[in-house]
Image (tube, rainbow, N blue to C red):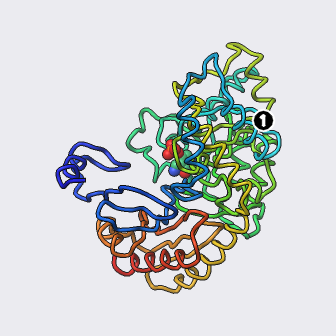
Amino acid sequence: MTPEDLAFDAKHIWHPYSATGNPVAPLAVKQADGVRLILDDGTQLIDAMSSWWSVIHGYNNPALNAAAKRQIDTLPHVMFGGLTHQPAVDLCKALISIAPEGLDRVFLADSGSVAVEVAMKMAMQYWQALGKPGKQRFIALRGGYHGDTQGAMSVCDPDTGMHHLFNHALARQYFVNRPAPRFGQHCEPLHIRELEELLARNAQHIAALILEPIVQGAGGMYFYSAEYLSAARQLCTQYDVLLIADEIATGFGRSGKMFACEHAEIAPDILCLGKALTGGYVSLAATLATETIANTIARNPPQAFMHGPTFMGNPLACNIALASIKLLRESDWQAKVSQLEKTLQEKLLPLAQHKKVADARVLGAIGVLELHEAVDMRAVQQLLPGLGVWLRPFGKLVYTMPPYITSDGEIASIADAMQQIIERC
Ligand code: PMP
């Protein structure tokens, strides 16, 4: 890429959460292979982010490449209205076979945020179909993140989300504090009381509780008690409120279980998947629901679930997702993730003693250093090429979610880079 191209990028192109005319220049990537990004100037960086938690098998994977090439040559896209195809059917069979019990109806969406919109609309349509049109609002956890579209934003943390900017347009939802007991700790009745009281008072207005099971991701990289999740599941059932599990970040092994709900041995009524679904190759997401929800919607006017994007069920994306799930199931991913967990613990937990670090935590293939103060992102961006590692901290959080094929030595390099960021940025 020429300097002129980079200047064009800076002036004309938006990047995530940035302004055009951004003084912090992005790094130009020309290729990627295994766990490494290769920059225009040949510099190689270990991708400690898995491209925002999606590239679980690494880049340039032969099985995923072959699945993409096969599909491009036969049927890269076809509309899903009135038509179907083998990759969609095979993918949905695979998803149903690995999903928590009872989730056997699948809506193929185009991105994580859309999967959340779909889940929320499903819950609202379900209660309307049951003759309870008053149940249209949602409970969400503070510290949660569910996406950037209108409905998804309304259930993101009201402070760190964008409520203040879009206050007049966002639906008003209910919020409870993030679970106090951390992962591995007991959840006492007092920890669940706020949720219980809210449900007791307002269940007649509430369609669903939406949460990220066990791991709150972009809202704070916080790991909470499995007992809280199972208590929340029980309360939803007791108060006749649906449970939506947003496993867009946690799905496909990231937390050490195929789905984070498995830590609490619960099944939600609606499940959102995305990110690692295609091994990070292309955008695809899925919303799974129970037969009860699907049938209730189907048997009541308008006898259809009212959502249907242009690229729904894109065959190219479905075929790659199918290959990614096959690769995961045929590999010993649990052993790989638990090895990553062990190495991350060895390398990161001692940094909890560092004077700039408030907390260090590891779960599955997720390692987090929470600092006392926010890092300087411009300094981070300048530092990283020299360290040979790609990280993207936010606020006070310096974290890694490496591809599952990352070696112990590469994890050591990632941990070193995280330490350098703390000390120099
Ligand atoms: N839910 C969760 C838990 C997420 O982490 C994200 C993305 N970070 C989303 C939803 C939104 O997904 P997308 O960016 O694909 O729209």
Give the image quarter of residue 318.
top right
Q: How many marks?
A: 1
The residue that appears at 75% across and 44% down in the rendered structure is 268
**Can you say whether 279 is above or below 136 in the image?**
below
The percent coordinates of residue 272 (x first, y second) are: 64, 42
Q: Look at the image and tell me in which quarter the C terminus lies.
A: bottom left
Q: Residue furthest left?
A: 4
**Can you say whether 86 is above or below 82 in the image?**
below
Q: Is residue 232 visible?
A: yes
Q: Is residue 365 left or right of residue 158?
A: right
**Can you say whether 239 is above or below 396 in the image?**
above
Q: Is residue 156 visible?
A: no
The one of 368 and 91 positioned closer to us in this rendering: 91
The one of 56 and 227 positioned closer to us in this rendering: 56
Question: Label 1: how many residues lie within 10 Å, few (<14), some (14-19) or many (20+)?
Answer: some
The percent coordinates of residue 352 (x first, y second) are: 54, 82
Where disc 1 sits, the SS reads strand
Q: Which residue is mark 1?
A: 104
The one of 5 and 216 positioned closer to us in this rendering: 5
The percent coordinates of residue 152 (x first, y second) are: 53, 40
Give the image quarter of residue 83.
top right
The percent coordinates of residue 86 (x first, y second) are: 69, 30
- Circle 1: residue type: Asp
The one of 204 and 338 positioned closer to us in this rendering: 338
The residue that appears at 65% across and 72% down in the rendered structure is 341
The residue that appears at 55% across and 65% down in the rendered structure is 402
The residue that appears at 68% across and 46% down in the rendered structure is 245
